[in-house]
């Protein structure tokens, strides 16, 4: 039976100068839509899973256009809400070689930021799901979004649905009177799988040590958590990175081989591609294969323009099995 994943979070307009132009050179912007959690759902859909995204859009033409974007990429939008008038957006200037990318956000007061728990019936949303996924960005947006996220996680627990949290967050996003240290641990303790960097675990949970020690401490603190996962990235230039995956599953420390990405097209959304690959992998493979699959999915996203990873299951399996040739498939 085909597995189903549900994700929850904001979807924004992404506006970028053409190609690798700087903001100061641009006479127009290219528009796509994206958001960490929706990116995960779309990636899962392209891998062959059923996928739905829960969000709130402005009740206007932009909200309808964003909904069409989700549908175009195989997502169910039956649980999309509409209200208020502002769409969150961000501006991306893509880096190249030694010049880094630059991002400017405009999301305060967006339709999604005004979401409240009473707007969503999570038992109805999650009734036929196999997996629920959230990220640390959502509870940083507003207190209402944080409360919705906690209610979704607890409902998934009640229904026996697996929960993953990609809890790396941005400290400068927390502007509504709560800190990540106050909110994230309470959400993370109800997860089955946590994706987080070592620095993130030290910052959010007040722990010390390197990845394996940190992961062991997390699982000891929160017995429901059974896997702690991260990807590591070596940045040789804006166009050349190396990545690998790491996992502590409570019994074994698993690491993938390093994948060399020599000509990056677009690195935005690569963490979401990793999370989607991990979800698919854990639902279909053993832990070691799942981590290999996640790392391969992440590497392939670097070759795809836009926020979302639209590669196929066959593409990921081929790279996972060691085919790095890029040869034409006929």
Image (cartoon, helix red, strand yellow):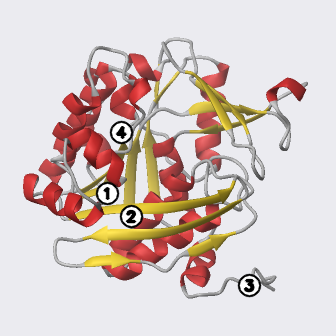
Residue at mark 4 to residue at mark 1: CA–CA distance: 17 Å
- Which label's residue is closer to the chain start, 4 or 2? 4
- Which label's residue is closer to the chain start, 2 or 1? 1
- The kind of secondary structure element at disc 2 is helix
Front position in the image: 10 or 263 = 263
Mark 3 or mark 1, whichever is nearer to me: 3
| Residue shown at the point (43%, 25%) measured from the top left | 172
Whether residues under marks 4 and 2 lie with C-beta atoms below 8 angstroms apart, the answer is: no
| Residue shown at the point (21%, 48%) measured from the top left | 156
Q: Is residue 247 above or below residue 145?
A: below
Rendered-image quadrant of the C terminus: bottom right
Mark 4 or mark 1, whichever is nearer to me: 4
| Residue behind mark 2 | 279
- Number of the label disc, if any, that sits on residue 131: 1
Q: How dense is the environment of label 2, judged by Cα within 10 Å: few (below 14), some, or many (20 and up)?
A: many
Q: Position of residue 94 (x, y in %)?
A: 74, 42
- Number of the label disc, if any, that sits on residue 325: 3
Q: How dense is the environment of label 3, judged by Cα within 10 Å: few (below 14), some, or many (20 and up)?
A: few
- Which label's residue is closer to the chain start, 3 or 2? 2
Whether residues under marks 2 and 1 lie with C-beta atoms below 8 angstroms apart, the answer is: yes
Q: Is residue 69 above or below residue 231?
A: above
Q: Is residue 93 visible?
A: yes
- Residue 100's quadrant in the figure? top right
- Which label's residue is closer to the chain start, 4 or 1? 1
């Amino acid at each position: 039976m085909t597995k189903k994943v549900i994700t929850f979070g904001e979807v924004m307009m992404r506006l970028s100068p053409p190609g690798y132009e700087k903001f100061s050179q641009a006479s127009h912007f290219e528009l796509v839509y994206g958001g960490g959690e929706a990116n995960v759902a779309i990636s899962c859909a392209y891998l062959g899973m059923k996928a739905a995204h829960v969000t709130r859009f402005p009740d206007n033409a932009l909200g309808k256009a964003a909904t069409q974007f989700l549908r175009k990429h195989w997502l169910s939008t039956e649980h999309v809400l509409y209200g208020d008038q502002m769409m969150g957006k961000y501006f991306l200037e893509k880096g190249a070689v030694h010049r880094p990318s630059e991002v400017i956000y405009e999301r305060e007061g967006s339709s999604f930021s005004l979401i409240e728990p009473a707007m969503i019936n999570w038992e109805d949303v999650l009734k036929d799901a196999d997996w629920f996924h959230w990220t640390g960005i959502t509870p940083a947006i507003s207190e209402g979004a944080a409360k919705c996220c906690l209610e979704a996680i607890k409902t998934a627990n009640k229904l026996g649905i697996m929960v993953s949290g990609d809890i790396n967050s941005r400290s400068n996003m927390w502007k509504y009177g709560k800190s990540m240290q106050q909110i994230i641990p309470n959400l993370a303790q109800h997860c089955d799988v946590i994706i987080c960097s070592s620095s993130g675990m030290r910052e959010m949970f007040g722990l010390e040590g390197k990845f394996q020690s940190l992961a062991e401490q997390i699982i000891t603190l929160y017995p429901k958590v059974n896997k702690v996962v991260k990807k590591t990235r070596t940045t040789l230039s804006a166009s050349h990175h190396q990545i690998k995956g790491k996992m502590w599953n409570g019994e074994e420390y698993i690491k993938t081989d390093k994948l060399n990405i020599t000509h990056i097209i677009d690195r935005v959304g690569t963490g979401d591609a990793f999370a989607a690959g991990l979800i698919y992998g854990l639902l279909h493979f053993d832990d070691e294969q799942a981590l290999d699959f996640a790392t391969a999915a992440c590497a392939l996203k670097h070759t795809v323009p836009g926020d979302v990873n639209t590669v196929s299951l066959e593409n990921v399996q081929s790279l996972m099995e060691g085919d790095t040739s890029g040869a034409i498939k006929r």
